[in-house]
Image (cartoon, coloured by chain):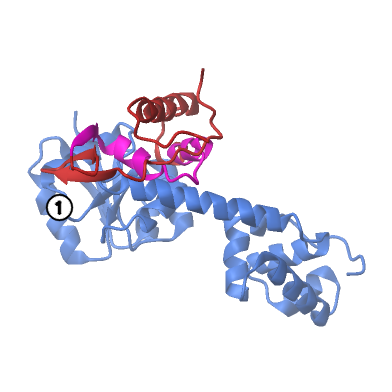
């Protein structure tokens, strides 16, 4: 059986080297290549079995989009599990390291094409520990989220959508100062120290996707 | 009696992991190999830190592997039961 591999890597030289590395294999045909994830995501996936994606192409939405269409393997530029954890959470099948031999790389590509998870040897324990800690952090954040008032949660959701203070005030029909007060209170309750942290947390918890917050203009 | 999945297994403090030619073993203080660890067992051994419940391990394993949760649960529990059977984990107080 022959598998079709797409490659997305920002490094032209590495992309060319990978193609040469893998071109000799009878089990593999090289499909589309791209230097950005958006270019790969915009392409045709019906014939692609696996997409090999550089760990530096990190847009989670694009990665989730590609992972929904084909099996994704992350090409890890360093022997760290943190890039892989984020990719696994949006549906990637696993990763391969830059130290992989051609045979190992091919074996992982074939495994991913069969729908099997591929975790580089030696990273499995660290990955498991990172996931456990991350799950605990998210659970703790969920508990803090439960401590927010309805209005604070609305402000949190709108911050997560990237709205500015004035825009939130317009949406909620309150003054900007009121929004700043809610933002300060919710950041204190959540233990975040900047709006950027608040935005990131809102997105991680899925609060930023809350639809139509601010429908009510009750005092607050 | 099935293992309580809220239990937090803890590696014996006098044991460590030794690697030789790519093969990992749990060894005692004299370096005597007691148990050979494959990649999965090694990962399981690393999270037996006395602070992580079996349920947490199963949940994290579910995020790594595509196997159904009952299969993962059975595999994780079997692995930890084997550690207990070999005397590699501290007895629960």
A220 in relation to A28, above or below: below
Which residue occupies the extreme right position in the image? A219
Q: Is A201 in front, or is A53? A: A201
Instruction: Using the image, name the chain to which the residue with label 1 belongs.
Output: A
Residue A71 visible: no
Query: Which chain did the renderer colour red?
Result: B
B38 in magenta: yes
- Magenta span covers which residues? B32-61
Q: Is residue A192 left or right of residue A188?
A: left
A200 in magenta: no
Which colour is chain A painted? blue
Which quadrant would residue A38 be assigned to in this image? bottom left
A195 in relation to B82, above or below: below
Q: Give coordinates of residue A179: x percent, y percent.
A: 78, 75
For disc 1, the neighbor class at 10 Å (few under 14, some 14 to 19, many from 20) is: some
Q: Give coordinates of residue A56: x percent, y percent.
A: 33, 63
Q: Give coordinates of residue A29: x percent, y percent.
A: 18, 41
Residue B87 visible: yes
Label 1 element class? helix
Which residue is under mark 1? A19
Q: Give coordinates of residue B2: x percent, y percent.
A: 51, 20
A102 in relation to A167, above or below: above
Check the picture and name the quadrant holding the N terminus of chain A. Answer: top left
Q: Is B89 in front, or is A186? A: B89
Q: Is residue B23 left or right of residue B16?
A: left
Q: Is B69 in front, or is B39? A: B39
What residue is shown at x 34% (from left), y 34% (from top)?
Answer: B88
Which quadrant would residue A170 be assigned to in this image? bottom right
Q: Is residue A31 left or right of residue A174?
A: left
């Amino acid at each position: 059986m022959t598998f079709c591999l797409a490659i997305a890597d920002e490094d032209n030289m590495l992309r060319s080297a990978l193609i040469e590395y893998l071109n000799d294999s009878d089990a593999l045909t090289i499909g589309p290549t791209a230097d950005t994830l958006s270019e790969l995501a915009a392409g045709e996936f019906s014939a692609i079995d696996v997409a090999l994606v550089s760990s530096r192409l990190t847009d989670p939405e694009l990665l989730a989009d590609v992972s929904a269409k084909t099996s994704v393997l992350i090409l890890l530029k360093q022997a760290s599990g943190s890039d892989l954890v984020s990719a696994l959470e949006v549906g990637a099948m696993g990763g391969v390291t830059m130290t992989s031999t051609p045979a190992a790389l091919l074996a992982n590509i074939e495994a991913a094409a069969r729908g099997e998870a591929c975790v580089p040897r030696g990273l499995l324990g660290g990955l498991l520990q990172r996931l456990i800690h991350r799950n605990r952090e998210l659970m703790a954040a969920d508990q803090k989220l439960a401590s927010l008032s309805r209005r604070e949660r609305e402000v949190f959701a709108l911050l997560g959508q990237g709205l500015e203070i004035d825009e939130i005030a317009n949406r909620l029909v309150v003054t900007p100062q009121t929004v700043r007060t809610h933002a300060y209170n919710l950041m204190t309750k959540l233990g975040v120290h900047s709006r950027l942290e608040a935005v990131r947390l809102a997105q991680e918890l899925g609060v930023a996707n809350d639809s139509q917050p601010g429908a009510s203009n009750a005092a607050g | 009696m099935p293992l309580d999945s809220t239990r937090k297994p803890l590696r014996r403090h006098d044991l460590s992991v030794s690697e030789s030619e790519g093969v990992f073993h749990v060894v005692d203080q004299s370096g005597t190999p007691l148990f050979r660890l494959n990649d999965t067992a090694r990962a399981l051994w690393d999270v037996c830190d006395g602070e992580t419940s079996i349920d947490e391990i199963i949940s994290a394993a579910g995020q790594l592997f595509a196997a159904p949760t009952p299969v993962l649960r059975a595999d994780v529990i079997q692995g930890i039961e084997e550690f207990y059977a070999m005397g590699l984990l501290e007895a629960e107080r």
